[in-house]
Image (cartoon, rainbow, N blue to C red):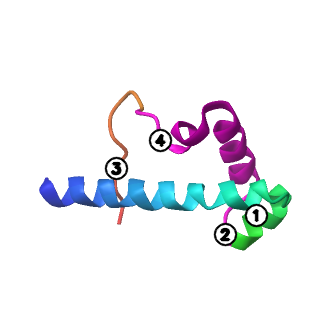
């Protein structure tokens, strides 16, 4: 259980770090496609993160809690 919780926190931190890389790239006027290619994500992801940041600043980049059972890890 402790290992799973630790992995979950690590992935959340990594996801936040990746999302936060979009902010400075977008601030200098790069297009979503340029930012996406630069950090290795889809244009749709950049579009979503850019909109969330515009609406809620840094809080918009944090994962919101989800209802329902936790996702299963199929590794």
Cα distance, mark 1 to mark 3?
30 Å
Farthest-out residue, top: 67
Task: Write down the residue under mark 4.
Answer: 63
Is 47 within the magenta?
yes
Tell me which label, 2 or 3, sits earlier in the chain: 2
Q: Is residue 21 left or right of residue 64?
A: right
Task: Write down the residue under mark 3.
Answer: 72
Q: Which residues are magenta?
A: 39-65
Tell me which label, 3 or 4, sits earlier in the chain: 4
Circle nearer the viewer, 3 or 4: 4
- Residue 37 placement (x, y as % from top left): 76, 70
Tell me which label, 1 or 3, sits earlier in the chain: 1
Quarter residue 57 falls in: top right
- Dot 3 alpha-carbon crowd within 10 angstroms: few under 14, some 14 to 19, many 20 or more: few
Quarter residue 11 falls in: bottom left
Secondary structure mostly seen in the magenta stretch: helix
Q: Is residue 60 left or right of residue 11?
A: right
Cα distance, mark 2 to mark 3?
26 Å
- Marks 2 and 1: CB-CB under 8 Å? yes
Secondary structure under tag 1 reads helix
- Residue 53 placement (x, y as % from top left): 65, 41
Cα distance, mark 3 to mark 4?
17 Å
Task: Write down the residue under mark 2.
Answer: 39
């Amino acid at each position: 259980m402790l290992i799973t919780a630790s992995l979950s926190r690590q992935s959340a931190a990594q996801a936040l770090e990746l999302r936060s890389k979009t902010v400075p790239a977008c601030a200098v006027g790069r297009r979503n496609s340029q930012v996406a290619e630069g950090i290795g994500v889809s244009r749709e992801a950049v579009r979503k993160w850019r909109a969330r940041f515009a609406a809620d600043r840094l809080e918009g980049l944090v994962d919101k809690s989800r209802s329902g059972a936790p996702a299963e890890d199929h590794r």
